[in-house]
Image (cartoon, rainbow, N blue to C red):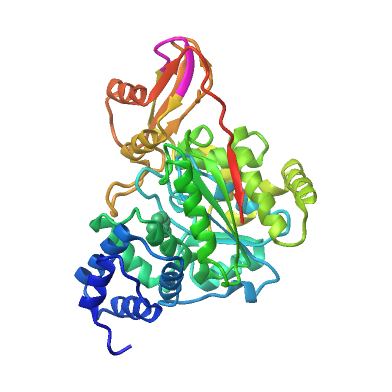
């Protein structure tokens, strides 16, 4: 498009006027190749963040961002290959459990995953707690893992949606991360570029989610599903609870241990339930199972030890030391552990999950700046959780330190500042709220 009038377009969007598909395409294309500068893209992002986008504008933006780079079209190379995405949470190790569990049922699954963002942990950071695990695969290596062991998780390669990499970095510093159309285009441009047969979205809701309120989470889920219309990737979403950390462990190495425990059939019930709900959808979307036979296949894979065995094969295929499944001491170990005790008897009525996530990040388990180095041994074990009855003096959590020295009393005080106690249990909340497609 030779006649793109950037100044007029920005003015129009600022006033809430419509953008033509070819204008959006040209804007993204020129920004990616460097002929539109950061300050003009920043202005457009702010106008979008304030005024929103129509469904058509958002679909065009998603397509323009995905076409800025490689498209893998994986669904053309396999009978079926699944993908999964989580909007992020605290203690969210669902992808780690789901991959080998689904793989053990004979269904291929590949994910281009992310690192920790804000208060939430990152799947790749957790995997890199495993000695020698390679989470930076080339496209060929990625596909070899799918071919050989059915499952793979790796970082997005440079070639996937370069427009998103540039735009995301700009959003991060211009206060435009929290925008439904921008989040939708960012997530879906990367997911659709991989081109799986199906995508299951785990859209979190609650105090530890990016979308805290139910209606916002639902709007995001519907927006992500709408952005995939006509793409060839079948998308479904589950809205799941993030008003409490998922499982007991939040960190990196400790979440790998918890993942293996779930695969051994000894893990926390909430992690198993949330993962199972998604795994059932993955198997059903493959067309080889109905709901009942999916549940049976998943039960069988877990009880027989095949899911655990699949995890060993997967870790080995990405260069990692699979012996960690039998010897947790091979994972990074905490140098010190501080216990937190209940200050009173009663019930834990709430854990502010955003604060719990920030606490875990501050221990070194996440990054506050892009170049921070992860302390894989650092983390928190939530031994008692929302709804649990506790006695005064009983251990409710363990704070695990890695390399850094910390003041135990200060950490205990901060931990207790985001935990609420009461005389009665809080009202029950489901773990899985809604299934959307
Ligand atoms: N994750 C992404 O990939 N992009 C966003 O905009 C938000 C979360």
What's the residue at 40%, 46% (across, down)?
Answer: 210
Q: Residue 301 in the image: state x and y as whole percent.
A: 74, 47
Is 342 magenta? The answer is yes
| Residue 119, quarter of the rendered image | top left
Residue 376 can be seen, yes or no: yes
Is residue 191 or residue 112 the one in the foreground?
191
Is 95 magenta? The answer is no
Looking at the image, residue 360 sits to the left or right of residue 283; the answer is left
Q: Residue 28 in the image: state x and y as whole percent.
A: 34, 75
What's the residue at 58%, 41% (across, down)?
Answer: 433
Compared to residue 307, the image places residue 356 above or below, namely: above
Considering every residue shown, the one lying at the far bottom of the view is 2
What's the residue at 73%, 59% (across, down)?
Answer: 106
Ligand 1 quarter of the rendering: bottom left
Q: Residue 404 in the image: state x and y as whole percent.
A: 29, 35
Q: Residue 425 in the image: state x and y as whole percent.
A: 53, 18
Q: Which residues make up the magenta segment? A: 341-349
Looking at the image, residue 327 sits to the left or right of residue 148; the answer is left
| Residue 1, quarter of the rendered image | bottom left
Looking at the image, residue 274 sits to the left or right of residue 206; the answer is right
Residue 260 can be seen, yes or no: no
């Amino acid at each position: 498009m030779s006649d793109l009038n950037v100044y007029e377009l920005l003015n129009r969007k600022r006033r809430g006027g419509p953008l033509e598909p070819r204008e959006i395409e040209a804007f993204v294309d020129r920004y990616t190749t460097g002929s539109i500068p950061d300050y003009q893209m920043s202005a457009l992002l702010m106008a979008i963040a304030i005024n929103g986008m129509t469904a058509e504008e958002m679909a065009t933006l998603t397509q323009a961002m995905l076409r800025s780079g490689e498209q893998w079209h994986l669904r053309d190379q396999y009978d079926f290959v699944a993908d999964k995405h989580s909007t992020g949470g605290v203690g969210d190790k669902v992808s780690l459990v789901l991959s080998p569990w689904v793989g053990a049922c004979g269904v291929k699954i590949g994910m281009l995953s992310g690192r920790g963002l804000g208060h939430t942990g990152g799947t790749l950071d957790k995997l890199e707690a495993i000695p020698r695990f390679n989470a930076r695969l080339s496209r060929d290596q990625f596909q070899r893992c799918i071919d050989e062991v059915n499952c793979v998780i790796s970082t997005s390669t440079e070639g996937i949606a370069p427009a998103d990499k540039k735009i995301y970095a700009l959003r991060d510093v211009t206060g435009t991360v929290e925008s439904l159309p921008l989040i939708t285009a960012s997530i879906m441009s990367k997911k659709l570029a991989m081109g799986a047969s199906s995508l299951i979205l785990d859209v979190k809701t609650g105090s530890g989610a990016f979308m805290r309120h139910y209606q916002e989470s639902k709007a995001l889920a519907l927006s992500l599903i709408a952005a995939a219309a006509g793409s060839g990737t079948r998308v479904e979403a589950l809205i799941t609870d993030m008003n409490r950390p998922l499982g007991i462990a939040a960190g990196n190495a400790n979440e790998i241990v918890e993942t293996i425990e779930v695969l051994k059939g000894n893990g926390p019930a909430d992690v198993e339930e949330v993962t199972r709900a998604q795994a059932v959808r993955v198997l059903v979307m493959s067309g080889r199972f109905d709901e009942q036979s999916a549940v049976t296949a998943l039960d069988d894979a877990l009880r027989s030890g095949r899911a655990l065995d699949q995890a060993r094969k997967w870790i080995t295929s990405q260069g990692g030391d699979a012996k960690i499944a039998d010897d947790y001491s091979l994972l990074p170990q905490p140098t010190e552990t501080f216990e937190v005790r209940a200050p009173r008897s009663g019930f834990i009525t709430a854990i502010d999950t955003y604060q719990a996530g920030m606490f875990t990040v501050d221990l070194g388990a996440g990054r506050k700046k892009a170049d921070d180095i992860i302390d894989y041994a650092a983390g928190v074990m939530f031994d008692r959780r929302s709804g649990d009855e506790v006695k005064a003096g009983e251990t409710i959590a363990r704070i695990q330190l890695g390399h850094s020295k910390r003041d135990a009393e200060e950490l205990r005080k901060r931990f207790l500042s985001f935990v609420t106690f009461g005389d009665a249990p809080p009202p029950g909340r489901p773990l899985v709220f809604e299934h959307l497609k």
